[in-house]
Image: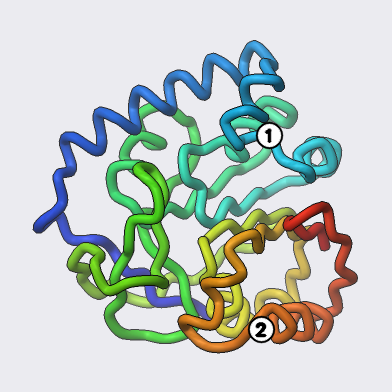
Amino acid sequence: MGYLGKRISKMDYNFAENFDYCKETVAELITRVDADDREWLAKHDHWESFTDAFIEDVKTKHCFLDVGAGLGFYSLIAKKYNPDIEVIAVEADPARAAALRYFLNVTVYDVALGADTGITKVNKVQICSSSIVGKDNGYPVIELPLWVIPQADIMKIDIEGAELNLLKGANEFFKNAHPRLYLEIHNSQRIPLIGGNIKDLEELLKQYGYELHFKESRVIL
């Protein structure tokens, strides 16, 4: 079982400008996490409804897979509360991935994960957020070999509407490894853009043996 990793080409992408911005943002985030500044983290949409539950869970886990790592908040939290845990961060945007490598002592893969092989595009959602779904105005990409997901006992997925696509391609992984799963679906309106809907997502997770617990738009399984 594996996924096709899809790396963003540097063509038509101002890597230096984006990297500088992401470095500054990650540096600020590290400072706030170290200071346990939860008010600032919540105000800037890092501390979420399931973050407290995640902290308690991650303390006893061995390998955390952070899919859609973004600026690395959950990777930072995992290392803060469990220094010995192995953290694998998956982030498709090359500038954010480079910033994570620059600051964090974790393994970083700058690929996108999905159910199918081929070529995809990554579209900007916000200045430091992107998705493989949405308007066709993303960056050129190049194809990479299949990337096999490692065994992890805790996992966070925040990929801006591509959750169902990923889960469909990972049936063996989720049925066999069955990690504790934290899933963001607040961009559920994006799911139909690549097929399916929120009900399909819920049904698939139940097929994998998960019981859903909703906290606002986030799901703990």
Q: Which residue is mark 2?
A: 171
Q: Which residue does the image show at 83% across and 53% down from the upper left?
A: 215
Amino acid type at mark 1: Trp
Q: Which mark is residue 47?
A: 1
Which corner quadrant holds the N terminus? bottom right
* Precedes in sequence: disc 2 or disc 1: 1
User: Can you tell which of label 2 and label 1 is closer to the viewer?
Assistant: 1
Q: In the picture, residue 192 is in which quadrant?
A: bottom right
- Closer to the camera in the image, 134 or 65: 134
Residue at the outermost left position: 11
Which corner quadrant holds the C terminus? bottom right
Local secondary structure at mark 1: loop
Q: Is residue 194 left or right of residue 123?
A: right
**Dot 1 alpha-carbon crowd within 10 angstroms: few under 14, some 14 to 19, many 20 or more:** some
Asked if 158 appears above or below 201 in the picture, the reply is above
Amino acid type at mark 2: Asn
Q: Which residue does the image show at 32% across and 62% down from the upper left?
A: 123
Q: Which mark is residue 162?
A: none
